[in-house]
């Protein structure tokens, strides 16, 4: 019997924390990504993920192209499925903004998770609280501990 892959959508805050050099949150985020990559998770990300990382990382690293650095690391990973915002996706995100009083970026991650049947993982406390009524959400350390991944 073939095991069904675990589905997950990850907010950019988790990846950025994993890149941070210090602190418990960074250690938890790095361990989370190690497990995601080794335990057969399918990752569903909106393209917004790359945009948020590029904006944040431009000030952190000295590279000719932040995108080329990211592309080598994650853009072509076998377990990542990139989701484009078509008309229905965009409409659903805009409706969720109004319904849950969210930032549009948070709604985009939520719709990515909902449309792919994935759990959403974030380090943003406001996002976690606002979305709990609309999709499955957890922190990186809570995802594997709670059994969300099963």
Image (tube, rainbow, N blue to C red):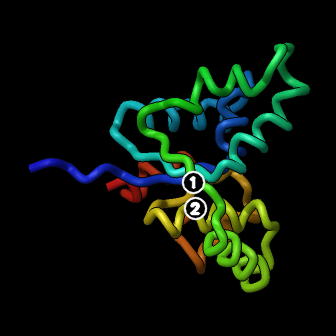
- Which residue is pictured at 84% across the width and 14% down the height? 64
Q: Position of residue 37 (x, y in %)?
A: 43, 33
Q: Secondary structure at mark 2?
A: helix
Residue furthest to the right:
59
Above or below, 9 relative to 111: above
Q: Position of residue 58 (x, y in %)?
A: 87, 27
Crowd band around label 2 with a 10 angstrom C-alpha radius: few (<14), some (14–19), many (20+): many
Crowd band around label 1 with a 10 angstrom C-alpha radius: few (<14), some (14–19), many (20+): some
Q: Nearer the viewer, mark 1 or mark 2?
A: 1
Q: CA distance from mark 1 to mark 2?
A: 7 Å
Image quadrant of residue 146?
bottom left
Above or below, 17 relative to 104: above
Position of 41 with respect to 68 (left or right) is left
Dots 1, 2 in contact, CB < 8 A: yes
Q: Position of residue 1 (x, y in %)?
A: 8, 50
- Which residue is pictured at 41% across the width and 54% down the height? 7
Q: Secondary structure at mark 1?
A: strand
Position of 104 with respect to 45 (left or right) is right
Where the C terminus falls, by quadrant? Answer: bottom left
Q: Going from the N terminus, do you reach mark 1 or mark 2 first?
A: 1
Q: Is residue 119 visible?
A: yes
Q: Which residue is at the front of the view, 57 or 125?
A: 57
Q: Which residue is mark 2?
A: 112
Position of 42 with respect to 70 (left or right) is left
Q: Is residue 130 visible?
A: no
Position of 83 with respect to 93 (left or right) is left
Image quadrant of residue 68?
top right
Q: Which mark is residue 83?
A: 1
- Which residue is pictured at 74% across the width and 27% down the height? 67
């Amino acid at each position: 019997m073939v095991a069904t892959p675990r589905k997950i959508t990850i907010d950019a805050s988790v990846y950025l924390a994993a890149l941070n050099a210090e602190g418990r949150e960074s250690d938890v985020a790095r361990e989370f990504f190690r497990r995601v990559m080794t335990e057969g998770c399918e990752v569903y990300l909106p393209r917004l993920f790359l945009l948020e990382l590029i904006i944040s990382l431009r000030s952190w690293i000295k590279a000719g192209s932040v995108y080329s650095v990211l592309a080598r690391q994650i853009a072509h990973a076998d377990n990542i499925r990139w989701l484009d915002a078509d008309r229905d996706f965009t409409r659903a995100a805009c409706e969720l903004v109004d319904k849950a009083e969210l930032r549009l970026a948070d709604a985009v991650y939520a719709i990515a998770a909902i449309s792919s049947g994935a759990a959403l993982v974030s380090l943003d406390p406001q996002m976690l609280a606002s979305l709990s009524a609309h999709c499955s959400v957890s922190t990186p350390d809570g995802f594997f501990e709670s059994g969300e991944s099963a």
